[in-house]
Amino acid sequence: MNITVRIAAAADSTIIAEYNAMMAKETEGIELDRERLRKGTEALIADSSKGIYYLAETDGKVVGQLMITYEWSDWRNATFWWIQSVYILREYRKQGVFRKLYQYVESLALTHGDVCGLRLYVDDANKSAQKTYEALDMKQSHYRMMEVDFIL
């Protein structure tokens, strides 16, 4: 299977929002507000300071995605790229789609000059995803994520 990776454009917002909704339902059992999700996707695509989506395609079909957002580290005087909104269509899983997306982003990060690392969070119960990330040499950090969510 030939997989290509590209930056998302405004015309991709509908498919990205759909994949984000599918991911939230599958991984967390959450039904996201589709209108808010669509607007959020469009806002990020329109403003690269918020982040950037990368899409994996095969035969002209978007089969996977990930989003990068940014976290400044004063300790490192550099930026962490956070991998978020990962979704691979079920029928394309375990075929190297995420690996291709990850390696593409990793190579960009390594040549960017001010990126100190890649981070992501994964649900404790999602053992399959954890194995995928570990196979790419990602390691569990000592941090535990805490949050207050004002919207969900």
Image: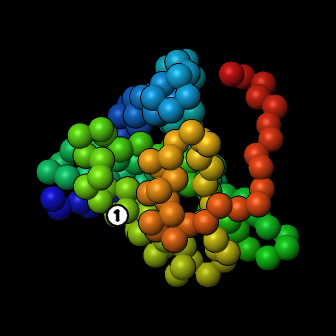
Q: Position of residue 115 (x, y in %)?
A: 64, 73
Please state if 13 lies on the left or on the right of 43 as rendered. left
Mark 1 = which residue? 100
58 and 24: which is toward the camera: 24
Q: Residue at x 79, y 37 (%)?
A: 147
Q: Quadrant of the N terminus?
A: bottom left
Q: How is the image coloured?
A: rainbow
Q: Residue at x 31, y 39 (%)?
A: 89
Q: Mark 1: few, some, or many residues within 10 Å (few <14, many ≥20)?
A: some
Please state if 90 lies on the left or on the right of 101 as rendered. left
120 and 55: which is toward the camera: 120
Q: Residue at x 51, y 63 (%)?
A: 134
Q: Position of residue 109 (x, y in %)?
A: 54, 73
Q: Quadrant of residue 123?
A: top right
Can residue 55 be spotted in the picture? yes
59 and 49: which is toward the camera: 59
Q: Position of residue 64 (x, y in %)?
A: 34, 47
Q: Quadrant of the C terminus?
A: top right
Q: Residue at x 50, y 46 (%)?
A: 127
